[in-house]
Image (cartoon, helix red, strand yellow):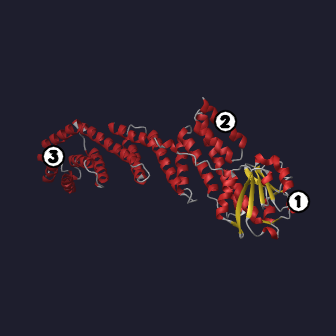
Amino acid sequence: MIKSFLSYAFISALFVSQTFAQSPLIRKAVEFYQVQNFDSAAYFIDQAALSPTATNDANTFYYKGIIYKERFNNTRSDQRINARKTAIESFDRFLELSTDASLKQGVEKNIIYLVQTLYNDAAAKLNIETYQESLELFEQYKEMHKTYGLPDDIQSIEMQYNLVLANIYSELYERHREENKNNKFFEKVVVVYQDILKAQPDNWSANYNLGIHYYNEAVNRIKVADFDLDIVAVGLVEDEAVKIFEMALPYMQKAHDLKPNRKEPIIGLSGIYFSLNELDISEEFNKKVKSLENQ
Amino acid sequence: MGCCKKGLKYFVIALFFVQSTSFTDQFNTNAKIKALYIYNFAKYIEWPESYKSGDFVIGILGNSPVEQNLQTMAKLKKVFNQTIRVKKFSSPDQISKCHMLMLPNASTSLLSTCSKKLSSYSTLIITEKAGIGVKSGINFVVVDRKQKFELNKQELSSHKLTPSSNLLKLAILI
């Protein structure tokens, strides 16, 4: 609140010191800004920016950036996304045109703030209903992160984002698993986890979850197999399932190696070996689970 | 920077779900595969005329996870026009006329007794223990981590059971 108040005070002071030199349209925009009517302020600053003399006027773009930033902060409608985009573009143009070092520093902070709100919005929308919007926002965030050289560790942020995304795909895959054999989310989950593992081969969650994902798919292939399958097709279903169980194995084994005392990968290995008809090995892992439970 | 912290908070909440991917329910894939094969045995073996009417009876001696799958199958399918009935026997004494008798691994020691009891019937005895194929009709074995089956032609013919050429092609013949 205090920060916001100081920001208003600073901008208002700046307007007061410069408005007389500005066009009536900018003056109007400032007046609306001061009473926090950001829609009207935006209307007038847009009109002002259309003037041929404004094209190369750094201050016009500064005001436009500030007005649109506030419009972004004060609306929940669809205009929010466009307001942020316009604010960033305006600040960007200001940086190209201005020679005022101290103002430029403030504008850079504003850009960082707006880019980080992209990240927040992407995170907030990262759920089963709105994950596609989240993906778009996160792509924008990554692009702008690169453009403006933000200090956050993008690799780590992307890793966390992808772990959640894979989990969402996984849930969507589970929802349609039994009725749809060619579930498009199966491959999506694999791709995201493999991307994570390319960057971080020792990521426990990605190894474990990918192992489970393959296991569940293999089980499903057999579970949904219809009794009408002829004897040749039964063999083919099993061949496919065995291949997928074998794909699960290295990831589950890695998860176990990374955290030998975690029960879940041991249960996973027991299940995979059981389905691969390696009953003795499966039983060994079962015993391990029991011994961990008794500790 | 404050905004970034806010962003991370979202992820902490979301990450709560990341490790929640769970195993599918404890589904016994081996049992389902065996049940699928057993249904095919029923279709690809010719029983004598006197066995082609009434229920198609599949007996199981003792406990087996295959039973549940066979029960499901019995509700959904028929062997040609015959309704499938799955009968569970707890000892060889209880065994009566059936088209197939499955001896789960744990019941293998009762194979000779069952064979004697069923010697005059056209019953296909199915086992699931390595090395026992010479004594039963069909024996499930594991080859390269996959479920395969041995077929004892002589045993089948002694019970007046005729396997189709398709079944013979896929079986490990004994």
Comes first in the chain, label 2 or label 3: 3
Query: Would residue A168 be visible to someone looking at this image?
Result: yes
Point out residue A168 in the picture as x, y percentages from the top left corner.
48, 49
Quarter residue B160 falls in? bottom right
Marks 3/1: CA–CA distance: 99 Å
Q: Is residue B129 visible?
A: no
What is the distance, in whole Å, between disc 2 and disc 3 at their CAs?
A: 72 Å
The residue that mark 2 highlights is A287
Amino acid type indicated by mark 2: Lys
Q: Quadrant of the C terminus of chain A?
A: top right
Tag 1: Cα neighbours inside 10 Å, few (<14), some, or many (≥20)? some
* Residue under numbered circle 1: B154
**Residue that badge 3 annotates:** A34
How far apart, in angstroms, are the residues tagged by discs 2 and 1?
42 Å
**Above or below A293: residue A48:** below
Amino acid of disc 1: Gln
Local secondary structure at mark 2: helix
Residue B101 point in image, percent of width and height: 78, 56
Q: Which of the two residues, A278 or B3, is positioned nearer the viewer here?
A: A278
Chain letter for mark 2, please: A
